[in-house]
Amino acid sequence: MRFSILAGLGLMLWTAPAPAADLPLFDAHLHYSHDAWERFPPERIVAMLRQAGLRRALVSSSNDEGTQMLARLAPDLILPSLRPYRSRGDVSGWTREPAIVEYLEARLARHRYVAMGEFHLYGADADLPVPRRMVELAKRHNLILHAHSDAEAVERLFAQWPEARILWAHSGFARPAAVAEMLRRHKTLWCDLAFRDDHGAGGKVAAEWRPVFAEFPDRFTIGTDTFTPERWPYVIEHAAWSRAWLNDLPKEIAERIGWRNGEALFGTGDR
Amino acid sequence: MRRWLVLALALWSLAATAQPLDPGTIAKLLRHGPWPQAAIADPSNRVSGRPEAVAFGRALFVDARLSADGRVACVTCHKPEHGFGDGLKLGRGLAEATRNTQGLFDVRLNRWFGWDGGNDTLWGQSIRPILLPAEMGLTVAQAAAILRREPDLACGYRRAFARSPESVADEALLVDLGKALAAFQETLGGGRSPFDDFRDALAAGDRIAAARYPAAAARGAALFVGRAQCAVCHLGPAFTNREFHDIGVPFFTAGDQVDPGRHQGLRRLAENRYGLLGPYNDDPARATGLLSRQVAARHRNWGEFRVPSLRNVALTAPYMHNGSVASLRDAVRHYSELDESRLHADGDRLLRALHLSEAEIDDLVAFLDSLTGAEARAVKLAPPEPCR
């Protein structure tokens, strides 16, 4: 009997369409680095985010000054995240650069953040001294780790800090079954879907993703990934694209992935 | 006889002193031929390959009456001496465009046309500049009226399509105009290059003939298919995979406007009446439209541009979608000093900064230069025969 009621509720969840046009969004993957702020002033960026219908935006930048400019201008909208990058060029060498630790310590002493990242970290590099120190700092400041990593590095991060809350950028570009397996293994792992199309191309949820979203409706977020300044105007396009495929999900799941999961993860729901 | 023997020995000696290519490199180089490729008629264009249509298209190509001010023809931007490009950073018809003009040699081999691939037919791509306000700036009705009004054009049309322009609706007439232009452009073969002679000599195991190829170009060829991995995208006989990539070239246009590249092209393709999925495709089976039906926009398409052929590339400077790279040497330097932070880092990136030495840059430039042949360098457009 209980099963049939649950099954019935499940069916209702899967058949009620989401209100696409009005769906607010939480974009959990944005960067506002030096070449972006040289081109688009903070006011223009905030206008783009509001035009896209974003309720909240997790922003990091290389260097951190871009994030701070946006956070000062729109504290209701911007959630600041700290990257271990003094410039975008640090993407490839930061794990072996001790000065990164000093940079992080200095920024953490001056500003408040909700996350550490997005950082690029693969395999055994996660256990190098600089990433370890970054994790210690995140732990001390109770920050979510936003990791652009393979599954191995995610495992190593959890080994260093079992209670860590990790937002797995691009869900590691892993297949949906592998993403689901990681979510089963780690109860404090969340997955952003930035810069991947396989789950929602053409406004339709892919068959292999649908059961993953059903099993973990509270563990996914969306994100644009503005990794070059030219991608900022794409935030608006991306929001429309996201609403299209979210509209192919039951309303409750669409809202969770679209914005509620981000609010819950970052504790911003009552702000 | 003795003189020939001395020459052969000298060439053999040259071959012996040049760095020998390993079998793997030779196998990779052989994939860039044979050349030229066989001409195949375009099934979506019923006049493809017909001499009367080629002649009419040739006349249209140089005819400035097909523009709003009567001063811009196709040849204004597609000049033979520039590989049918224009030598300018940005194209200029009635006004300055936002993209570099692409060359037309061997254009028949393309799968997508234009930097963004918004057209899937050469005839559709040929219609586009006629209607664009910044290029030739006509309306459909104006183009049709010119074709009907001018006796020599009407004559050419009748010969090419075996019907009177008076009997054809405006849009169908414009499409036929595009198809005649395409029939002509299909004949613009770029000819053979020194590389083709080298490649065929390697295929034949002819060391003497292979040794005639400059040593620097041979080293550049090995680098091209080897460590530099250029052939991953510039592959096959036409030196292109015919698809789209982001190679780290900024894609802002004027001010803070962005050229979305392939992303915009896919949108245009979906709305395009002058393509394989539209009403003017002459292929009754519509098998040619399969790819156009299936292709869908992806996030990575934002700022991607078509991989151009490298054949006759020495004639088509400046380079890249926005003409921002002045010379072949600068193009090689772009890849040597690639700003990897502009590319999405997903852990399995195709492009890496090559960090080439000056000697390696010289070699790659010598190789690229060898993809341009004497035939392409000498090509001229003879005045069209008047149709009476």
Image (cartoon, rainbow, N blue to C red):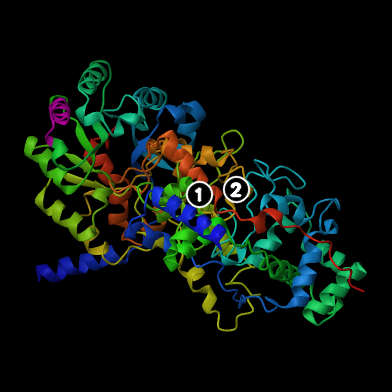
The quarter of the rendered structure image containing the C terminus of chain B is bottom right
- Nearest-to-viewer mark from 2 and 1: 1
Toward which corner of the image does residue A146 lie, by quadrant? top left
Q: Residue at x 43, y 51 (%)?
A: B13
* Tag 2 and tag 1 share a subunit: yes
Q: Is residue A77 left or right of residue B74?
A: left
Say few, some or many: other residues with alpha carbon within 10 Å of mark 1 (under 14 / 14 to 19 / 20 or more): some
Chain under numbered label 1: B
**The N terminus of chain B, quarter of image:** bottom right
Q: Is residue A128 magenta?
A: yes
Task: Tell me the kind of residue under disc 1.
Answer: Pro
Looking at the image, residue B205 sits to the left or right of residue A102; the answer is right
Q: Secondary structure at mark 1?
A: loop
In the rendered image of this protein, does residue B135 appear above or below residue A56?
below
Upstream in sequence: badge 2 or badge 1: 1
* Mark 2 vs mark 1, CA separation in Å: 16 Å
Q: Name the secondary structure under disc 2.
A: helix
**Measured from the top left, where is residue B357 in percent x and y?**
40, 35
Residue A247 visible within the image: no
Asked if the stretch drawn in magenta spans residue B69, the answer is: no
CB atoms at circles 2 and 1 under 8 Å apart?
no
Magenta residues (range): A127-139
Look at mark 1 in the image and give the residue it sits on.
B214
Residue that numbered label 2 is attached to: B314
Name the residue at 77% across, 63% down.
B140
The picture places residue B161, in percent across and down from the top left corner, at 78, 79
Residue positioned 26% across, 44% down in the render: A169
A142 or A148: which is nearer to us?
A148
Frontmost residue, B128 versus A169: B128
